Amino acid sequence: MLEEPRDWLPLMLPGTEGVSIKVYKMDEVTHRAVVKVRFDLRTSMPRQTYHCYAIAYTVSGSWSCDERSFDTGDIAYGTFGDDSTPTGEKDTEIMIVLDSPTGRYIDNAMPDGSVLHLGERWLKALEGVGLPEYRQLDQMPLVDRLPDTRNVA
């Protein structure tokens, strides 16, 4: 049984204002992560590309991914290559299981064209962390920032 992490951790990455996370487990053997995400009212994440399978159960509130909407009790499925912008319509909590054979999970597209890759190293660093520890954690070395490749020939 997984213990409930004590604190919501407000994401401190570009484009994630109003989004918090609890990382229950990041299993480095199976490459499975169990997380809970909370969106404040009308909060969006950057555009995301998935390098994993995802099952998201809406614990409370409502949210959307582009043209699809989800309410309390709804389940969303995602797969490799899915590309979307998740947005919380109300204060929303979502429990998510991420499965990846490679340990790659989600890429966030930044306005400058670069990409922030949120992978196993980042998730493992947040597993079970309390707010005091988290506030001391520099997250940027834990994510891979990939350069803008939009105009590369």
Image (cartoon, rainbow, N blue to C red):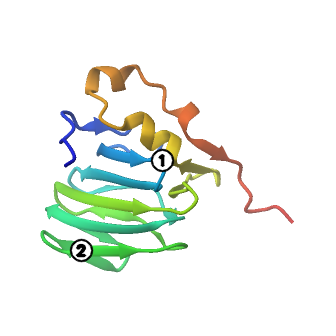
Residue 81 percent across, percent down from the top left: 55, 73
Residue at 31% x, 51% y is: 35
Residue at 30%, 60% in the rendered image: 96
Q: Which mark is residue 5?
A: none
55, 72: nearer the viewer? 55
Q: Is residue 104 above or below residue 123?
A: below
The answer to which of 74 and 39 lies nearer the viewer is 74
Q: CA distance from mark 1 to mark 2?
A: 25 Å
Q: Residue at x 27, y 26 (%)?
A: 131
Instruction: Indicate which disc, 1 or 2, sits on the residue closer to the N terminus.
Output: 1
Q: Position of residue 110 (x, y in %)?
A: 56, 52
- Relative to 28, 127 lies left or right: left
Residue 82 falls left or right of residue 61: right
Of marks 1 and 2, the one in the foreground? 1
Q: Position of residue 59 (x, y in %)?
A: 15, 61
**Residue 28, which numbered label?**
1
| Front position in the image: 128 or 106 | 128
- In the displayed image of the protein, which residue is found farthest to the right? 153
Badge number at residue 75 = 2
Picture quarter containing residue 24? Answer: top left
Kindly identify the amino acid type of the residue bearing the numbered disc 1: Glu
Amino acid found under the numbered disc labelled 2: Ile
Q: Image quadrant of residue 97?
A: bottom left
For the C terminus, which image quadrant?
A: bottom right
Q: Residue at x 46, y 74 (%)?
A: 79
Q: Would you place residue 7 above or below residue 29 in this image?
A: above
